[in-house]
Each structure stands twice: as structure tokens, then as C-alpha cells.
Image (tube, helix red, strand yellow):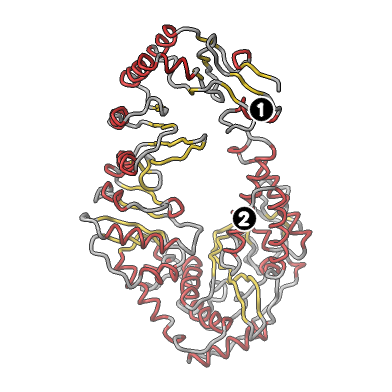
Amino acid sequence: MKVVYAWDTKLYNKVYDNIDDIVRDINNGTIKSFKLVEKYVPGDRITSYLEQMANEKNREIIYTDDVHPFLYSDISISDCVMNPSFFNKHRDVIINALENQIRNSDSTYYTIPDYLYSDELLDYLLKKKDVTITIRDVDLSDEIIRKIKDKHIDAYLEKNGIRNQISSRYVLCFHTVEQLETADFIYMDTNYLGELDVNDLKYINSSCVIDFHYSRDRKDYYPKILDFIEKLNNTDKSHIVKIKVDKRSLFNKVFLDKEFNNVNIIVHNDLYDYSFKEYKDEEKRLDQIIEPLKGKELSPLERFLAIYNIVKNFKKYKENTNQKEESRYLRYILDNDYMVCVGFAKLLEVLCDKVGIDVKNLSVAVDTSYDDGFTIEEKEVEDSGHARCIVSMDDDKYNVHGLYVSDPTWDNQLDENRLNNVLMTFDKMDVSRRMFYYSIYSPILDIHNFKEFNEQINYLLKKEMKENRFIQNNTFEYKLLYAYNSVIERVLDNINCDPKYDYFTQKRITCKTEKDYEKLLTELGNYLLTRINQKVDENIIFEASTYAGKVIGQEKEIDKDKYYELDKLSFPYEIDNENDHNLIGRSK
């Protein structure tokens, strides 16, 4: 077996041969730590890059001997090494120098190997502020580990070459003790709460607003927050917790019947901060609106159409030009005379949520330049914001399955009972009077075959890799995997009301390679083709709506002659994927 002498490699740039030079450089801070090692034989435990190479090539390494007792390296992949016999001969002098160096150092990073460790030295370091300590090859008692954790420092225990963190300076969601004690507000993420140590809650000051932002982990988001609040409620201080609520039914199921003595709950929903009481009162108002549906046997399509009719007839479209928010948000439109598209879409979303129909708000921009006369003459595009909804519908009774666009604003004719825009396919949405500009992810919802899906995905991947400035300095492989993950995540955001959203989200999280992402995209694309542009015959809509109206006692004759199906030739735009903003461009 060939032998490699470590002092002949480029990994070590200085060789010491006497104790005086070593002590001198310990005292001046050049030498801070080292490993005691004489040689490495292939098959032994690997602790360095050099040993890994030696093991692969079947080489023995001689690290130190009597002539080369200490090797110094300033390369991060190599440790300084000392001959064990030399160390034992000069043990007291070396330990004394190392301890003095630590006590006189202003560093915040310390490594304590087994030959240097003592409880006294550890206690000294624990008195320092913002330190990071690595303890090597020492068996620490539970009492010592608890003492380290209570100091909230970054501490690691390295044994047999494996490094594990035993303590962190971060107490809750990457917040330090100092931040918890002094901050006016802190952001919380349930994904990073981890195993909650109730002892850490004592650091949060009473005036601090603890702000939970919505998590994609919809299943555990609210239960995790409840667990946190219940523990917080049992402390001897009062606290303020703000919860961003995206889906009211999930929040209500966990929180609505709860009361807390020491925790003031703020519910952030519909761009407003509700007190817990205000939120509960508003929920009662919403429950009153859907009272006619309670206890009635209705299929999903019938329930949706009953809600749609309630919403589109809730009041006449009217803008409050002086206070625009009063036409848009639940806290106003439930009581006043104003309501515009944002209010119609939001009311449809929250009422459908109450009856088990999944709906997502869809914010778009619509072209209003053709409103008068619906002509195709050349004129400057005039666009305006508009709110609609995407509805996930699965009804076996009527065999209706898919994702649809719903627009109660455009059916808001109180003197007529229109259902023109209730369950639009994306094809029909393309030609329904006022058109919207696509966001770059919207065309993914208007596909007819896998080729179109693949073209859209490739366009989005190229755009992400080219324009995302945060990944430009990385390798092609990194940028590609990042783009796959980002694009799929945002495509799924468009269908977060679909029953398989959580399924595909979990699959996305587990993807590691390009092959994994391609496999997921194939499955996702084929699934979307079963959900998108699945036209619903108008007679089915009329039948289900009529039946629902009879059951809930709100029957009203439908203006069937008002139901229109526009010819796609009248559509004056085409999608332009070469456009930087992917806006709809003029084609006629």
C-alpha cells in the first residue's frame, strides 16, 4: 500500500517542529483548534476530504511524526493536526495556551475538542453574547444540554464526524430572544414553528403583534396556530395574535367556537383586520344569507347555482366613487347600497365556501374599448380592473366536472334572471363581450391538448430562467430546477380551488430532479385536460337552477332567450407569447 505524507500535500501550508512556535501562534490567535491524529488507514472512519481521496485510491496517510508534530492549514476543508504523543508530552502548556486564547478572544465562533473541554470553560463561553460553539467528541449530560439551550446560542455537538445542532439562537420562527422581548410585531410561519418549547413563549412581550401569514400547508395551518395560541393562553401575560385567513371554512372549523382569556385574536381577511368578535358577528350575517339552503338536499351544482342567484341579485351594481372600498369589501357591502365586481366575486367566494363549493377569486383586466356597439374598429385599448371567480365543480347527478369561470357581476340584472356567465369554460370566457389581459400564467387554464399545455410550460420555464435575477449567477441545472419548481407552484396557484391541488402541491415539494418535474408535469397536464373547457349544456344549468330555486323557495323564471353563445370570429384578439408581458394583442 502506498503512503502519502500529509506535510508534502498542498493542503498544509506550514509545518511546526517545536512547542515554542506552537504556543506562540496559539497565543497570537493563528492556531485555534486541531485534531489529534497520527495516521489514516483505508477503511477507518473518514473525517476529511484528504481521507476520502486516500480511501478511494487505497492510500495510507501519515499525518504527523516526531519530526513533523504539527501541521497547520488555513484551508477550510482541512483541519490542523497534532501528533498525539507530542500533545501528551506538552499537554499542560498547550491547554493553558488554548484556554487563555479563548478567554482573551473577541471571536464569536469557538470549537472545543474533547481534550480541551471542561464545564468551567463552557460556563465561561455561555456568558458571552451571540456566540457559536462546536463541541467535539464529548458526551454531554442532559443537564449540560439544557443549560446550553437555555442560553439560546448556536451550539453543535460533533461526534464521529457527524455534526448535529443542539441549540439555536433562534427561538420561534427565526426570531432571537432580543427580538421577541423588544419587537412591536413579529412574523410567524407555521412551516417553521417546529416542536414548540413552551419555555420560549415567556420571551414574547405583551405589546408585540404575533402575525401568522397564510401557509400553503392548508391542512395543518390553523391547527398549528391553535396549538400555539392555547399554549400562549396559559402563560401569565396577555398577547396579540393576528391570523391571515384565506379560507374561512377551515378557520371556522378550528377557531369559531373558541374563547381565549389571555390572547386577543385579530383576523385578517378581505384586506381588513377584524377583532375576533367582529369576525364572528360577520359570520352570523353570512349564515343568515344562506339560511334558505340549510337542511336542504341539493347536489353540488344545485347548491352553487342557488348561491350564484343569491349573489347576482344581492343588490344592483353601484360604485361609491368617494369611498371605493365601500363598494368592494364584505364589511361594507353587507349593509350599504353599493357593490361592484370585487364585492360580487368576494360574496360568491365566501358563501360558496360555506356550502362546500371551492371557489377562487380571479383578478383580471378587461378591455372596455368595445363596449359601445361591440365593433372591431381600430382604437386605443382601454382596460379596467375586473373580478371574477374560478369554480371547481364536481356533480355526479348532472355529470358536470371541471374548472369554470363565473361572473355574477355580468349577470347582475335585477329585472331579468340571466345565467349567461355562471359556468363559463375558458373558451367561452375568451369571447364573452369584455375581454381580459392574460397574466403570463392564465393561458395555462385555456388548453385543449397536451401540446398546448407543453408549449405554455416551456414558454414559462424559459421566461423564468431568463428573467429571474435571483438565479442568474447559478449553474444551468440549478436555474432549470428552480424554474420548474417556481412555474409549477404558480400554475397550481391558479387551481388552488381544485380537489387535487393539495395532491399536486405535495408531489411538487418532493421533486428533486428534472425527471421528477417532467413526470409531475405530464401527470398535471393530463389531469388539467380533464378539468378545463368541459362545456356545460345550458339546459343542464337551467334545470339545476330551477330545481334549486324550488327547493329553497326562491324560484324565478330564467330568461333563456338572453343566453348567448358568441361566435369566436368576433373575438378581436389573439394570445401573443412573444410579447414580454404576454398581453393579448390585436389581430383584426
Q: Is residue 400 visible?
A: yes
Depth check: give the residue in front, 278 or 40.
40
Depth check: give the residue in front, 317 or 542.
542
Residue beneath the point at 43% across and 55% down: 190
Residue beneath the point at 24% across and 51% down: 206
Question: Tag 1's secondary structure?
Answer: helix
The residue carrying pointer 1 sits among few (fewer than 14), some (14 to 19) or many (20 or more) residues within 10 Å by Cα, namely: few
- Figure check: 227 above or below 539: above
Which residue lies under the disc numbered 2?
A: 508
**From mark 1 to mark 2, how far is it between C-alphas?**
36 Å
Instruction: Indicate left or right for 185 with 479 as reference.
Output: left
**Of the residues shown, which amino acid type is indicated by label 2?**
Arg
Residue beneath the point at 75% across and 65% down: 448
Which residue lies under the disc numbered 1?
A: 53
Q: Position of residue 264 (x, y in %)?
A: 27, 60
The residue carrying pointer 2 sits among few (fewer than 14), some (14 to 19) or many (20 or more) residues within 10 Å by Cα, namely: many
Q: Position of residue 296 (x, y in %)?
A: 48, 89
Give the quarter of the figure containing the C terminus: bottom right
In which image quadrant can residue 262 be found? bottom left
